Image (tube, rainbow, N blue to C red):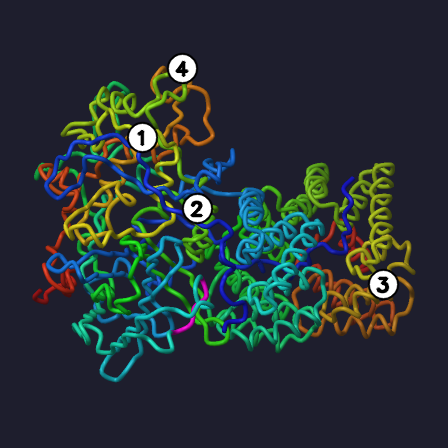
Amino acid sequence: MRSFSLGLAVSAVAVCTTAAYLLTTPARAADHRDAPAVDGAGEGDITDVYAFLNPKDRSRVVLAMGVNPFAVPALLQSYRFSTGFLYQFKIDVNSDAKEDFVVQVTFRDTDAGQRVRVRVGQPDSTSVGGINTLLTSPNINVTGPVGSVIGDSGVQVFAGLRDDPFTLDGQFFRIVAGTADVFRDIPASPIGPLRGRKVGANGQSGFDLFAGFNASYIVVELPIDAVSPAFFVNRSRIYNIWGTVSTPYVDESYVQFERMGQPLFNTVFIPAALKDAFNAGVPADDVARFAGFVPDALTTSDNDGNGNTIAGRAALLTTLGLTALPNGAPLLLPANFGNTNKDLLRVALLPDVLRLNLAADPGDLSIGQFGLSNGRRPGDDVVDIALRVLRQLADVNFPSGLGVPGSGPARAGALTFPDRRIFAVLQGTDFVGPDGNIGNLDNNSNDSPFLTAFPYFAPAHPRPGDEQ
Amino acid sequence: MGIDGPFPRTVVAPVWGRLTSCAAVACRRSHGILRSSIAFFVFACVAACPLGAADLKFAGGAGVSMSTDDRIAVFEKWAKGDPHNAQNCNLLAAAYIQKTRETADPGYLERADALIGRVMAREPRNYEAWRLRNLVELNRHHFSTVAEYAGKLTAWVPADPQNWGTLGDALMELGRYPEAAEAYGKMTTIKESLFSLNRLAYYRFVTGNAEGALEAMRKAVEAGAPYPENKAWCLAEIGSMDFKLGKLDEAERAYRDAIAAFPGQHQAHAGLGAVLAARGRASEAIESYKRAQAIVPLPQYSGALAGLFTAAGRAEDARKQNAQIDMIARLEEAAGQKANRTLALVYANQERNLDRAMALAEADLELRHDIYTWDAMSWVLYKRGRLEEARKASHEALKTGAREPLLLYHAGMIERAAGDGEAGRKLIESALALNPRFDPVQAGVARKALGER
């Protein structure tokens, strides 16, 4: 008999009172509608975060963040920024995953439309983390109307609707759900038919789920020494950058409920039940909290007695016909890639921040140098980069008896077949765009061409019937 | 500065270092996609965070569900890794409170309280800890305290719907229905969710709007919730309301849906038992009540089983159930628990231990003044023969017009005994009109009182 004191039993009324930050609903990529706390609050739901150097002037950094996912062109006038939320870009310059300076963006309504205010500066030491206050003495302070490029002191700002620059074949969600196996159909393979999308009359199979949709974007370009030239002396040349959205909290503060660094990380690796906790968390806690949700990386050493090495995986993918068109992208890493660190994927993915090398050429993607890539530019094919890295490096425990690399004894750090994410990465691409473009990882085949100058993101899709 | 200040600094200072073991990779693109060496920067403390054996089983991202125990395991690991991190402690405390809901085991509530205390000792103005503290107090039935705290918290953060919810919960228990309606209204205005809609439904049912209550509760189910138990609880409430309205098919369906959503939903197992008993399927009803009892041994489940066993001629089984009720009562007494209207009702129905029943009901009435506590009080007073007091208490129980057959039946029996046979008859008829088999034992007593067979 359990020793209950039943007088303490939950009353019929004292119910459903658990804090609502642990909600669970299906997630969608990149980070569009990624967790219950932000579902239904589109103006606080980050779609993507970007950080890159001005391609013509490496002394200037561009930061961008989208909200209002799947904004429909027919309802252009209905999408606004929240006047209550605090939108922030957070920049860590000394690699402790805590913000050293911030770009704070707020909005207010006027009779003439919304106005944006951008503050840039160093946060008070007591205002670092998940609870923040507005900068009281910002180094930069820019205000102006939404929908126009505004600027002051070398700072440029745009806030308003743009084309959603993210691309992904929605087939991803069918694969994860188990109603499809791969992106592109493979009628016959050594492991039998793999259900996927047929190649259409145009020779393509990929379908961009985000084509035709807009998102509300905040784009800020500023000199990298904008806060204070001395501030960066002897600092790392690697910026860790992430975006957050916070809501008014107690005593004039704001509490964070949404964040994003790298594309797809939250979607792919964070369990649905923990997404709200993830979004309210800070990068400095990511390794301790979430390392366990990222699989081991393969190494040069066989870890299961079946040749489960990087070379073994490469050979397996090749044998299955998945490393050449039309059934898959070429290998990204050579078969003799010499990694010896099983934590390599964790190193690349955690903490969840974009890592931008100020010393690198603005056009240098530098896959694998700092994270999955060097910062993030609007057109980078981040989906294919992730798929190609993961299919070659993520440790997978296949069923014993298959006799293929990975089919040895159960390993705690491996993805366990049939985890549907294993299927999602098999082909190393989602095939969005023409096949001839697969491999151009700096071209994601977005439905609208990007601009070569500020604000870089393509104009919003117009209302049906209106001219672009 | 905010009430809880920044989150404490992490105890591990990450150090970036260059991983030099990566092999050479051919440079294949002019923009440098692949360099001659791929050099990842090592987040050094990764090595200090070994995988838990269970971690990756949840790593499916979208669509992977986690039970409350799974979440507790994750948050315990986080809190152990960084015990000074207030967010870690608050997440774990919230999961413990949820586990209390699912098991009625006060041990989880104590653990939650200890965690919250730890956070508040370091950060006295940690808002999240305060709102969790109020949930603990709510589960402890300290309703006046909850109302006081919730009033302060709603002033602190008016936009937080949860505090309006706990304020409304406390006011409902205190019988301050108009104020509760206002609090729930504010909560629903801020955000329509399972959490606000199920409260709106409860208010509507208590105040006589049964159809509106069902509508709101169905919307609550559609809204969904993070824990399967939350949705199951709402489904069980739909079952309960339908049962009280005599809609046995709908009630059975709702109870079965609740059990499918969360097999540990003991109220649904018990409710299904009541439906099956009403249908005359006593043996199945007994099994369903026993499943509820196996999850949480509440005295009302023992009481129902004792009644069913007695009706089936299984006197020894009935005696064991009554013995269990008495053991629960002794455990409560030893724990210093003085108030329990449910146990009081069980004893009153069984017409034994009436002194204890009176004490339990009176103590509960000190804590709250809602219609259900007044009803329990009236029934115990009736069984003790204190009819005028019973009548007054019964009038309090009926004042909101709730379509509760049990309350109407109690009121009718009291009026009848107090000398107003006509009023009593009408009340008993109205109870039976709602559900002719509202209780496996008491419905028969009601019919008998009306001279029916």
Residue B248: give x, y in percent of width and height: 61, 50
Q: Are marks 3 and 2 on the same chain?
A: no
Give the Cα distance between marks 4 and 3.
Answer: 69 Å
Res. B140 image quadrant: bottom right
- Foreground of the two, A237 or A249: A237
Q: What element carries label 3?
A: helix
Give the Cα distance between marks 4 and 2.
Answer: 34 Å
Magenta stretch contains residue B384: no
Magenta stretch contains residue A132: yes
Give the Cα distance between marks 3 and 2.
Answer: 59 Å
Count of numbered circles on the image: 4
Q: Are marks 4 and 1 on the same chain?
A: yes
- Of tags 2 and 1, the one toward the viewer is 1
Type of the residue with mark 2 = Val
Residue B253 seen in render? no
Give the Cα distance between marks 4 and 1.
Answer: 27 Å
The residue labelled by disc 2 is A287
Which residues, given as a range, are shown in magenta? A130-134
Type of the residue with mark 3 = Val
- Foreground of the two, A127 or B172: A127
Pointer 3 with pointer 2, Cβ within 8 A: no
Give the Cα distance between marks 2 and 1.
Answer: 20 Å
Q: Are marks 4 and 2 on the same chain?
A: yes
Q: What element carries label 1?
A: loop
The residue labelled by disc 1 is A339
Residue at 63% over, 62% down: B135
In this image, A307 relative to B358: left or right?
Answer: left
Type of the residue with mark 4 = Gly
The residue labelled by disc 4 is A401
Give the Cα distance between marks 1 and 3.
Answer: 76 Å
Type of the residue with mark 1 = Asn
